[in-house]
Image (cartoon, rainbow, N blue to C red):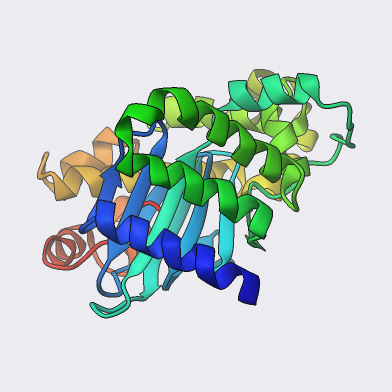
Amino acid sequence: MNHLIEPLSELQQLITRHCKTGRTETKIPRVALVRSDAPTTPVQVLYQPLLCVIAQGSKRAMLGDTVFEYNAAQYLVVSLDLPVSGAVHEASPEKPYLAFALSLDPAALASMLLEMSEQADYASPSPAMSVSPITAELLDPVVRLLRLLDQPRDIAMLAPLLEREILYRLLMGEQGAMLRQIALADSRLSQVSKATVWIRRNYAQPFSIDTLAQVASMSPSSLHRHFKAVTNLSPLQYQKQIRLQEARARLLSQQGDAATIGLAVGYESPSQFGREYSRLFGAPPGRDAARLRGAPVAEAV
């Protein structure tokens, strides 16, 4: 741990300098920074494939019934679009929550795999979200990538090289097997990904597991088993969370009353919509939206 103190300190300084509050999209492609000076209210968000490195503070995320807590000197990898409840757990004005996020590019991962001779067993999918201790080999290129924010003329030339180094370190690390599956068209993770993409595009429509299995090119029993293994949710639970997240976003933007929004996201019964919304978010739609408008909300990483 002592050998990480200096690079972590520099990472904290870089994030503090270039991110004043909330989430900041940087001039480096696919790189964002997050800062929070206080704990936040848990909120349902859609995590997309990414690497998140915590420089300071901690965050909690719940996927299904599994709780992930990640803090300084740890990194989170997400390999699939996942509906997650997340909140900054540890933060203060003196020691704010600071995080680096890199969106993962499947094409870049696939290109690198073609050049790597090492093979792995891709038959069994890994969970699509995991936390690991950071290594000096991974932290070093992350810090060097963020240094480019102080030398923006170098970004176009050097950022792709440093991103490639980061991806290489990830592929060779604890989450390497999971990341390899992102890039392989015939992997179980890729097949489950086809199913989740279809659900997100058609979340307001009812579907059968047979239809979804055809989309994923799997048998119904195999799809259900692997979908649960990867996302910690059944296909119907995944659809329900996507529906309710969309409803919450519409309520927060005041795009209509609760009954109208419930119908728009696929609920036939306003009472069922109200019950399931309250079960997931802890309050009826109107009260929850009013509460969120006056409370700090967690960013996506």
Q: Is 98 on the left-hand or right-hand side of 132?
A: left
- Residue at 69 percent across and 50 percent down: it is 127
In the rendered image, is residue 8 in sight?
yes
Question: Relative to residue 69, is residue 217 depicted above or below?
Answer: above
Question: Relative to residue 279, is residue 33 depicted above or below?
Answer: above
Q: What x and y, as percent, mark residue 154?
A: 39, 29
Q: Quadrant of residue 4?
A: bottom right
- Residue at 89 percent across and 37 percent down: it is 121
In the rendered image, is residue 60 in sight?
no
Q: What x and y, as percent, mark residue 152?
A: 31, 33
Question: Relative to residue 191, is residue 3 depicted above or below?
Answer: below
User: How many numbered dots are placed on residues in this image?
Assistant: 0
Name the one closer to the observer, 173 or 143. 143
- Residue at 51 percent across and 27 percent down: it is 160
Q: Quadrant of residue 266?
A: top left
Question: Relative to residue 166, is residue 293 depicted above or below?
Answer: below
Quadrant location, the N terminus:
bottom right
- Residue at 13 percent across and 44 percent down: it is 253
Q: Is 57 on the left-hand or right-hand side of 141?
A: left
Q: Is 27 on the left-hand or right-hand side of 209?
A: left
Name the one closer to the observer, 251 or 296. 296
Name the one closer to the observer, 33 or 144. 144
Q: What x and y, as percent, mark residue 215?
A: 63, 19
Quadrant location, the C terminus:
bottom left
Q: Is 54 on the left-hand or right-hand side of 171?
A: left
Q: What x and y, as percent, mark residue 252?
A: 16, 50
